[in-house]
Image (cartoon, rainbow, N blue to C red):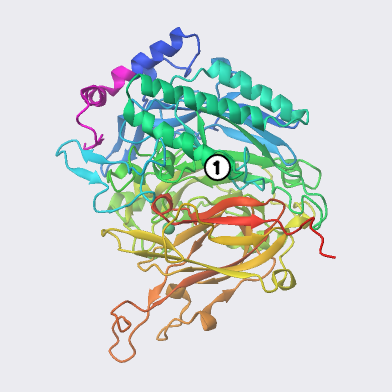
Amino acid sequence: METADKADKKDPEIVQEQQQPSRRAFLRLAVSTASGLALWQFAPEAWAVCQTQNAPLEPVGEIASVGGYLQGIIDTQVVKRSITYFNGTIFACETDHMLRCYQGYRGFNLDSANAVIKNMGTSGPGPTLRVGVGETIELIFLNRIDPALLPETAVTSIMGQCDTSTRASTGAQVYPGVDASHFPNCFHASNTTNIHWHGTHTSPNAFGDNVFLGVLPDAKLNARAAIAMLKQAFTDWNSGKDPSKQLIAAAAVNLNAMYKAAVDSKNTNLAAQLKAAIDANKTDTDAGEFPQFWLGAFPYHVELPKWSGSLTQYPRMGQAPGTHWYHCHQHGSTTLQILNGMAGAVVITDNSPDGYDGRLSKLGYKEQLMVLQLYSEQPNRVNNGPSSSQVAVNGQMIPTVIMKQGEVQWWRIVNACQKAHGIEQFFLVDDAQFQGWIRNGTKLGGPLPVIQPGVIPSLNQCAQDGVQFAWENFQRARSAPTFRMAPGNRSDFLVQAPKKAGTAWLVFWPPAGAAPVTAQTGSVLKVVVTGDTASQQLPTQAQYPPLPGFLADITDAEVHGRKQQVDFSMTGSIGAPPFFYIDGKQFKEGVVDHIMLKDTAEEWTLTNRSLQSISHPFHIHINPFQVVEIYDPATMTPAGLQPDPVRDAKRLPAPWVWWDVISIPAGVQLTDPLFQTPAVDKDGNPIIVPGHIKMRSRFTDFYGKYVLHCHILGHEDRGMMEVVEVVNNTTVVKHH
Ligand SMILES: [Cu+2]
């Protein structure tokens, strides 16, 4: 198998390193054990264990809040892990992947007894975090990635260096290659990282959901000292003090010390990168901004506001209880780090009597949390192997969910995959139909098949993107046989088993234009309904959780006059060098692209001019939005007519569903009425009618800068992102 090689062939130490990654890894484990700090809770020989298919679905280990605080550590390291996938004939297992990944610890102690993930030898998500509305996440984030193990990337994201990869077999550079990517819109700085708290309504600044942050790797971090200091910071916060100044000062000392060590050891390349990071921090703080580069450790202090009960008093919008997630969000490294597995679920609960969890847990439904991931060692344009097409669930290959007849289970599904093309439409099929596909070698993809009746549990969606459905939308979703998920989406279902034993399979179905997959690759989950019975019912309207007041529809009056457009487009096509744009340009450092007034609502039109069925999942941080209109020119244009958004767009019925990631349908090219050929303008460019989504959002409670982007992360890393800023709508200045 071809693997990407590092770029710098001149350094003999690095070349040897590359050839013997496992020896280095063993050394590292020995060193850390000797230092008394338990690393991962397994012996080296247990690394890279292969997965079996159809084993019972196992929950991911959890860190849960206690007394209003979720306290824990997420430790990022490089580990040798297996990747399992269907290679066209059998389920193959590759055991030679060095992957960046998360281990979780309960509390502020790296004691192996507190380690959450028991098997680090297979690819999988980080720990699930379970925390209540109104509570605070206090998380010590460590980046102990050893850059010597993954030397093909720069340390900081400001040195102007794209990652380069060469094919081991030919020595030819494969990245950047046909992509022709240019810094900063290329894969880069892949050992530097941070956390995005996807779905949280919280501050985007400082120690909150701040994705401008870059935590640089420090393999030699004095973890005990770092943890002690950050633990003290949380104690300060909890007693009303602000430890920011001391934290920033200590981080500067650490960065300077590493810089000095790099200078002393004549590592000029690393020294230059650290100097650039130090200078960037000075520029930030001189301008009154938060320093963006930290070394090895960072304290995330994420408050999840409980709604005030009023739309005019802070918090005007509460944190929606539901299925959310966390993942890396360093521009240029998000794709690769997500492919390595750097994501996990955040289950935010409201256990009050009328709360989402309070109501549903009373009905006794078993919860099944599923984190869908794709794994690879390289972004897919470099490693075109099939491994990055097999969707894993909680790190397992097509695991089995057991249901009793008539049982209702509460499924929470997180789509933590990095790419959408090919994994958007999901549904359950009966065993007979599925086995027929396997027998006949049927490829899944294109128009949806006729789903044959059989033993298929019913999907009853009750939440989208961690925001519960209003009763009306729960009723509308009851008969839906399929559901769509783009990367970043979460869907909750109250799945009801039929009153008959049997087996069903959850599959995904690639859309027209995407590469079809085998039935094995397209299968995600096996569902077995046993001979046992349970007498459970879906909730009645009286039992169903009422919609909190802050999720009331955003009215026309609220958005009056406040409208913006965000346009997604790309050049190139499948197989040709792609470039990704929003509003006609790639992501640009130092520019704010959209400004919103705090505590006001706006209606935005999101357009997509890409052709070939390439939809772009739009995501914006901090506040969810309501989708009020959708226009898919490929499916909504009556036969024989030219596409027309004014005539054909579908206005959605209220109450509107809240989302934080929505796929914008692709555009289509107009047909020349005279020649019946694809229409072009006078310069020969295609005349495109874009697909669109109209959404409304309240930019409320928090001011600051954050981002919107495409959640196909290979698009985001290569430029499909913009910076937005919510500015204060009040002033103390008087004018009288
Ligand atoms: Cu995209």
Compared to 247, does 608 lie above or below? below
Work out whether 54 lies above or below 692: above
Q: Given the current orientation, which residue lies at the most extreme front position? A: 736
The residue positioned farthest toward the left in the image shown:
170
- In terms of image quadrants, where is residue 106? top right
Q: What is the quadrant of residue 669 in the picture?
A: bottom left
Name the element at disc 1. Answer: helix
Q: Nearer the viewer, residue 556 or 489?
A: 556
Answer with left or right where residue 260 lies relative to residue 180. Answer: right
Taking the spot 37% from the left edge, 64% from the top edge, the residue there is 570
The quadrant of the picture occupied by the C terminus is bottom right
Percent across and percent down for residue 484 are: 50, 58
Q: Amino acid at mark 1?
A: Asp
The x and y percentages for residue 16 are 22, 22
Going 71% across and 59% down the picture, which residue do you hit? 470
Write down the residue under mark 1.
284
| Residue 493 visible somewhere in the drawing | yes
Mark 1 surroundings within 10 Å by alpha-carbon count, few (fewer than 14), some (14 through 19), many (20 or more):
some
- Residue 409: in magenta span: no
Residue 401 seen by the camera: no
Position of residue 277 measured from the top left corner of the image (x, y, whole percent)? 46, 36
Residue 372 image position (x, y, % from top left): 48, 43
Disc 1: residue Cβ within 8 A of ligand 1's nearest atom: no
Which residue is more in the foreground, 634 or 154? Answer: 154
**Residue placed at 30% from the left, 86% from the top?**
676
Q: Is 266 situated above or below 83?
A: above
Counting labels gives 1
Look at the picture and state if 179 lies above or below 51.
below
**Ligand 1 image position (quadrant):** bottom left
Q: Give 454 or 572, whichever is nearer the viewer.
A: 572
Q: Which residues are magenta?
A: 1-24
